[in-house]
Structures are given as C-alpha cells and as structure tokens.
Image: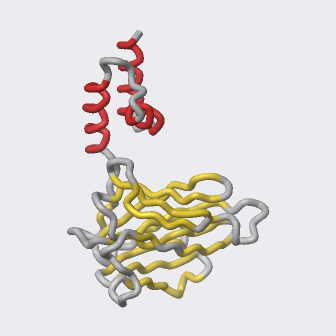
Amino acid sequence: MHTLVAVAALTTLLAGASTTSYAASRGEAAHGAGTAVAVAGAAAARKAPTPRIVEPGEHVVAAPGFELWMTAEGKHWLEPDLPDFPQFRSVVDGNVDLSRPGVSLHASAFEGRYYLSGLYYGGKGTASRVTVRTSTGPVHGKLIELPGKPGWGVWYAIADLPTVDDGQEFLRGVTVHDTKGGVYSRLRLR
C-alpha cells in the first residue's frame, strides 16, 4: 500500500499538482517515499516555467488589440479601446525600487473583459508564473522579460468581468511565484 501511495504521490508531483507538493512539504507523504518525492520535487522545479524572453521592442499580442513590449526604459502597451495611444510605465524614472520585491497593476475594462498588466521586480530566484486574485477566482497570466538579468519583467492576463461589477471589488491582488513555488513578489489589494 505504501508503494502505491508513493507512486501516486510521485506521479502527481511530476504533473505539477500543488496538493501533492503541499502534502510532501507537510510531511504527509507515505513512509519510504521521501527520497522519491524529494527527487521528483527537484525535477519539477527544474521544469518550472520561466518568463518568455523577448527582444527590446518585440510586440507580444496578449489578445486582439492588447499588445505589450519592453525596452530598457520600461513597459509599453496598447489596449483595445485605445489602439492609437501607446502607454508607458518607466523603470528608470525613480518611481520603482528594483532592489525590493514589488508588483504593479494596470487594469483596463473593455467589452466585458479586464486587460491586466504590470511590472514585477526585485524578488529572489527566478520568476515563474503569475496569479491574479479576483472576486470570482484566480486568473493565471504570463510573464515576459528582456534578455540577461534586468531585475524586472512584465506580467499580463485577461479576465472576464463578472456580470455585476462596480470596478472596486473585482481585483484582490497579484502574486508572482518563483520556480520553487514560493513568492517572488506580491501586491495585495484586499
């Protein structure tokens, strides 16, 4: 029975299920499975997603009309409701302290969807994934960075707006996770 549980835990861990990772970290793995789970955990960490590396000025189309690109100076983007007005968020103007973990958030509603994006910076390790907490549940986004180790990157996501939304209660927070499953940086809104 212990071998069956260990194999199931190992298989689930390799598939990236967080509950098994939680159970293993809480010491709830089957007796004798500790080594197999530790090896699987190390393998899973090596295979954790990392940000997409983009060249300066390379446009990433997140959705029709929602484009993002990066330069050494910061984040640039277009939104569906303002296609002729590129926006910009600087990382060099002194308003962002890249030495401390942080996340910024820009949200724009258009035709029943929220177009979400921001900077992430200053965390330890390698950023892996982003989760936006909303009143209707988590929304998973994507990460992009420039080549090298710039110390910052851009995250983006798209969320459907709930049918009743006053714009104040929907967004709850943004967490960028590292490749080991920890927190790279976090923004709490509620």
Residue 31 or residue 162, whichever sits in front = 31
Residue at left 37%, top 69%?
Answer: 101
Taking the view exactly as shown, the residue that stands out farthest to the bottom is 93
Taking the view exactly as shown, the residue that stands out farthest to the left is 148
Residue at left 41%, top 63%?
Answer: 185
Quadrant location of residue 80?
bottom right
Residue 77 or residue 4, whichever sits in front = 4
Q: So how many labels did they put on this image?
A: 0
Residue at left 75%, top 71%?
Answer: 166
In the rendered structure, the answer to whether residue 33 lies left or right of residue 107 reads left
Residue at left 54%, top 69%?
Answer: 116
Taking the view exactly as shown, the residue that stands out farthest to the front is 27
Locate the C terminus by quadrant: bottom right
Quadrant location of residue 5?
top left
Whether residue 180 is situated above or below residue 71 in the rendered picture: above
Estimate the x, y position of residue 173 in percent, counting from the top left: 55, 63
Estimate the x, y position of residue 122 in percent, counting from the top left: 33, 70
Locate the N terminus by quadrant: top left
